[in-house]
Image (cartoon, rainbow, N blue to C red):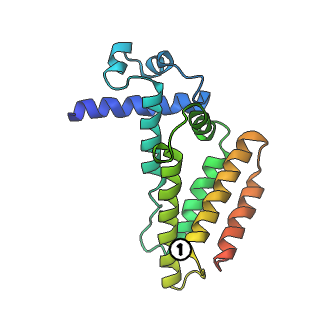
Amino acid sequence: MGDKSLQKKNRIVEAAREVFYQNGYRAVTMKDIVEACGISRGGLYLYFANTKELFEAVLEQENQTVLKAPAAKDANPGEILLMYLDEQKKEILKKKGNLSIAIYEYMFENKLSDNDLPAKKHFVETVKMLEQLIADGVAQEWMVCESPSEAARNIVYTLEGLKVTAQTIGVSAKTVDSQIAYIMGTLGMVIK
């Protein structure tokens, strides 16, 4: 695929992301994507056969973005973890512009095998990234943790639970902050 085609495909995925953010997965049609992109229906079908395929492209791009741990020059693992958690907090507190509902609708509608579940892939990759970050923090004596893999899983479970809670019954910034402080505290770090 040439640069121009790749750019167009990425623009379609970006526009589709916004449509899925706003409407979930089930309610979105290819017509909605055409309108959001400002391209012809035929132009869209050159790149994607249906909303399922397009949503999977959105998820793939989302995974690549979310899994890149925020990095700053001279930041220690604890600071990087805190930056990551702060980004997650922003996602949790968004009333719109969050893919959580769309992801669950997608998973319930498409009975996929374990190997095909984008959410499972995202979970596994996020746990690996956090596990490495925590292991680095322990090695550099910024953190205290007996099992970085269990701590990483626990963080992901907590964040996912907060995302679902935020979209169903609501959650306050204070609650999210207290959970982040608890996570950091379990790793021997205090947030000021």
* Secondary element at image label 1: helix
The answer to whether residue 191 of the structure is visible from this angle is no
**Would you say 174 lies left or right of 2 here?**
right
Which residue extends farthest right? Answer: 169
Say which residue appears at 65% left-offset and 48% top-offset: 92
Say which residue appears at 59% left-offset and 64% top-offset: 153
Q: Residues within 10 Å of mark 1 (few under 14, many from 20)?
A: many
Q: Nearer the viewer, residue 25 or 79?
A: 25
Which residue extends farthest front? Answer: 113
Which residue extends farthest left? Answer: 2
Task: Indicate the quadrant containing the N terminus: top left, top right, bottom left or bottom right.
Answer: top left
**Would you say 148 lies left or right of 54 here?**
right
Q: Which residue is mark 1?
A: 134
* Amino acid type for the residue under numbered disc 1: Ile
The answer to whether residue 48 of the structure is visible from this angle is yes
**Would you say 52 lies left or right of 27 here?**
left
Task: Indicate the quadrant containing the C terminus: top left, top right, bottom left or bottom right.
Answer: bottom right
Q: Is residue 48 above or below residue 187?
A: above
**Would you say 103 lies left or right of 125 here?**
right
Q: Is residue 163 above or below residue 140?
A: above
Image position, residue 36 (x, y; %): 47, 21
Image position, residue 133 (x, y; %): 49, 71
Image position, residue 9 (x, y; %): 33, 31
Say which residue appears at 65% left-offset and 42% top-offset: 94
Q: In the figure, residue 27 lies in which quadrant?
A: top right
